[in-house]
Image: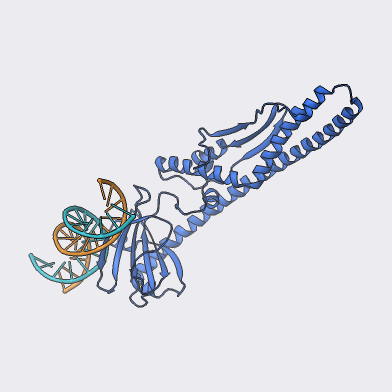
Chain colours: A blue, B orange, C cyan
Amino acid sequence: MEHPVWIGSSLNFDLNINPIKYPDEEFKTKEAGSCDSIDMGRKIFENHEAGKLVAELNRMNEENKRLSEMLTVMCENYNALRSQLDDLTNNNNKSNAKKRKSESVTEENRVNGSTAESSSSEEEDSFKKARTGSTDVKIKVSTKCVRTDPSDTSLIVKDGYQWRKYGQKVTRDNPCPRAYFKCSFAPICPVKKKVQRSAEDRSLLVATYEGEHNHPNPSMPAEAALGLSLGAVPCSASVTSTGPSVTLDLTKTQQRMNGQDYSSQGCKRESEESAVSQQQFFVEQMASSLSKDPGFKAALVAAISGRFLQRSL
DNA sequence: CGAGTTTGACCGGCGC
DNA sequence: GCGCCGGTCAAACTCG
């Protein structure tokens, strides 16, 4: 990673840049007194330009603050909506499971009867687990159908996660072998995956996922990961009397992740361990996002140039 | 040599 | 109790 490793929750870039001696300054000292009227005019012009730049910087700073606040509000709204969606999905799953139990529909029939989309997904409770009596532990089961080349014998469904195959079996109702996978991206991830070709349509790979990942998807884009899991990252670029500084206030982010604010949104971490690893992941992603953000770069350049101007006055 | 895959053996649930 | 079946284990094997 080319980005710096930031320790602590608050990042502060203090741009204490040593005054740079411009060739112009040398010219001034050498020929002091010889061109007073020209120097005066230049100084007035520079003061005027610097004033304009400082005003522009202040304006940008205000706008940045306003946008940060808007972003925070948007993310809070998003989290609230997401928790509502989760509740609705859970309720739906419960009713679906009951329905399927009564109808005695096998999973294979359901999959074959699904739409002929190249890729589809749905979630349901494990009625198999319910059958075995362990109704307390609800394992999330989802299926995904992927259309592949029928001549391709590999049972690989690309979903961004890292899987380790631990078994293969030919089942009674399907001549195609079923492969068993465990998630190997995180050592304690409980998710399992079964992949089997559809008996009726050999070009259709049916992947059945059991359980939920306790880690982010390794292939998830940085922006999506940030938006889904963290919300806004408050940051500001400012020019003060003591000099310009760019501050990333991650304390708010941390509060949101660990404190009441975050948990009240229904986004509780599953374990402390995963929370710590996720924090590290997010900090890296934030650094990456900021370094790519042209707006952030512009603000930084403006702050540095403002500092130069102040020093040269 | 270590990590991942293959494959036969084994285990537990279920129906008869 | 027995056989069937799906799921898992683990030793052997392969590959980089």
Residue A28 spot, x, y in % from top left:
82, 25
Q: Can residue A232 be seen in this view?
A: no
Among all residues in the image, which is located at the extreme front? A30
Q: Which of A33 and A145 is in front in this view?
A: A33
Find residue A197 and report its image quarter. bottom left
* Image side of residue A280 versus residue A154, left or right: right
Residue that appears at 72% across and 36% down: A305
Among all residues in the image, which is located at the extreme right? A37
* Image side of residue A7 versus residue A187, left or right: right
Residue A59 spot, x, y in % from top left:
76, 40
Residue A113 spot, x, y in % from top left:
40, 75
Q: Which of A76 and A297 is in front in this view?
A: A297
Among all residues in the image, which is located at the extreme bottom? A200
Residue that appears at 39% across and 54% down: A212
Q: Is residue A71 visible?
A: yes
Q: Which of A173 and A150 is in front in this view?
A: A150
Residue that appears at 89% across and 26% down: A35
* Image side of residue A96 versus residue A27, left or right: left
Find residue A43 and report its image quarter. top right
Quarter containing the C terminus of chain A: top right
Residue that appears at 67% across and 26% down: A18
Using the image, determine if residue C7 lies above or below residue A242.
below
Count of labels in the image: 0
Residue A243 spot, x, y in % from top left:
70, 29
Using the image, determine if residue A173 lies above or below residue A263.
below
* Image side of residue A224 versus residue A179, left or right: right
Find residue A55 and report its image quarter. top right
